Amino acid sequence: MITLTQAGSQLLWGVCFLLVTKLFWELFFSPLRSFPGPFIATFTNIWRAVAVFHGRVDRTHLELHRKYGAAVRIGPNCISLGDPNLIRTVYATKNPWKKSDMYRPNDVLVNGQRISNIFNTQDEDWHSKYMRPIRSFWTMTKVLDLESLIDETLDKFVKKIDAKFVDGANAGKVCKADDWLAYFAWDVTANISFGRHYGFIDQEKDVDNLIIDSTKGLFYFAPISQIPWIDYFLDKNPIVRIGPKPTLTGVLYAFGVVAEYQAEMKDHTKHEKNASKKTSHTLDKYVQLKKTHPDLVDDNQIVNWLMLNILAGGDTTSATMRAVVYYLSKNHTAYEKLVDELDHAQLSIPAQWRDINGLPYLDAVMREAMRINPGIAMIFERVVPEGGFTLPDGRYIPAGKKVGINPAVTNRDREVFGDDADVFNPDRWLRKPEETQEAFNARSRRMKDVADFAFGGGGRVCMGRYLAVLELYKLFATLYSLYDIRLVDPSHEWTYRNAWFVYQYDIPVIVSRRVKA
């Protein structure tokens, strides 16, 4: 009769045998064995999850690619690609490569029902079907219709900055730029989406924990997405849910806003009064689609669309905003060039797109901030399609394997951006004195193609990218026309955590009114 001790010993030996067998297979027989990378990553995804959990996976990926080259094995079935030339192939518009299952933990679970969204769905047909009715709302031409809503938030923000940090007894008070830029970004998102602010600026805090819950959700999603089946035992556990419930707070908030909007529509007098005063916001436009697309659009679908605004609009743009303030405070030359350009432009306040669209140095600063500190700095995973894929160097990746590119890697490609690719240098976006116009156009086009990948690629490119550009350019043209914004200590270093979105902390600044020459 086998004792418990013997049974346990046999189980242990069995597990060891399986591990050794798997390691032997991955090292000598796996079709990915020719791809270098961390040893542990050859036989387990735990390496990936741990690397992401530490919050510096962008640096890790960059170091790996500079050590091993254009293709690095970061999991038993996953290859990280660092060649910018492959962006248009992996993230094609026609016959797109399918998103991997890494996105599935981003589903929200409401009343036992698992709800995907346009961002994370793996179903390309479903994505195209539900993007089609709203795609035209997000062209730059249509986004400019929302400029007055951004102006409302900008006016509110400037008045609050004046009162809290610039005027009277509060002059010289330290401003936590990381918090206040997030408040602005999230309130802009709300005003554009619902025609009202969350109240972050007014109340000077994270209202209803929307920001902190969103952050917790991404802190969960980022490492779990590297081993996505674990999510079934954590957040999607049907018995006891474990984890921060990614996106749930935002979904419930959106359902509440839609319900209030529907109630307001029934009160025709109130609705007409509000409508006469407001630019048509996103919710207005989405509700109108019930009439033109009754077979597709209901309240659940409207919430699904609004979730894109809520989840990405605040976090990604605030990440870029913090980068602009931080890097300009660290680079006096760039700072002076920007304010000189803004002074000569003699802008109205808030700055208007028609006046700032052609300012070359403002454009250079914004592009450089998004390049060196992309708001999303993890691999956008895709599944190799049927037939497999052969890299330019001849190595073959079979169908079904996961591949992807991290914009934090391609954005620092030295062949594209120069030997100083790790340095904040807006001048790289300007024509050099000895450079012909033709050569500059080609270099600029190449840099833009690569850096714009921070917004995604192909048919899954970020829907709100033009809105983000409008918001960023208007904010900083306004702020740097009005204020000097300096780090309390120029040598101070921020802290950050990469959890799909990039979160930066500890940016204490002094804001003072500019005295123009």
Image (tube, rainbow, N blue to C red):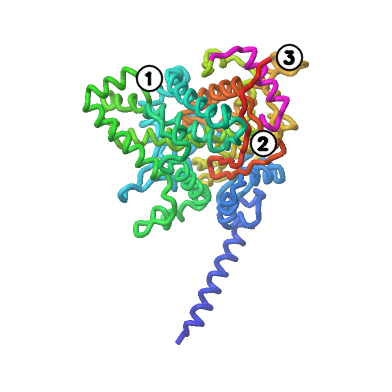
The x and y percentages for residue 479 are 58, 24
What's the CA distance linking mark 3 and mark 2? 41 Å
Stretch in magenta: 328-348
Q: Nearer the viewer, residue 450 or 172?
A: 172
Residue at image mark 1: 279
Quadrant hosting residue 198 = top left
In the depicted structure, whether residue 354 falls above or below residue 214: above
Q: Secondary structure at mark 3?
A: loop
Cα distance between the residues tagged 1 and 2? 39 Å
Which residue is at the far right? 434
Front-lying residue, 404 or 150: 150
Q: Which tag is nearer the camera, tag 3 or tag 2?
A: 2
Question: What kind of element bears circle 2?
Answer: loop
Q: Position of residue 237 (x, y in %)?
A: 38, 56
Residue 283 magenta-highlighted: no
Query: Circle 3 is placed at which residue position?
Result: 436
Q: Earlier in the sequence, mark 1 or mark 3?
A: 1
Label at residue 488: 2
Label 1 is placed on what type of residue? Thr
Residue type for callout 2:
Val
Point out the frontmost of discs 1 and 2. 2
Residue 331: within the magenta? Answer: yes
Q: Amino acid at mark 3?
A: Thr
Q: Is residue 83 visible?
A: yes
Residue at screen point 46% across, 18% down? 144
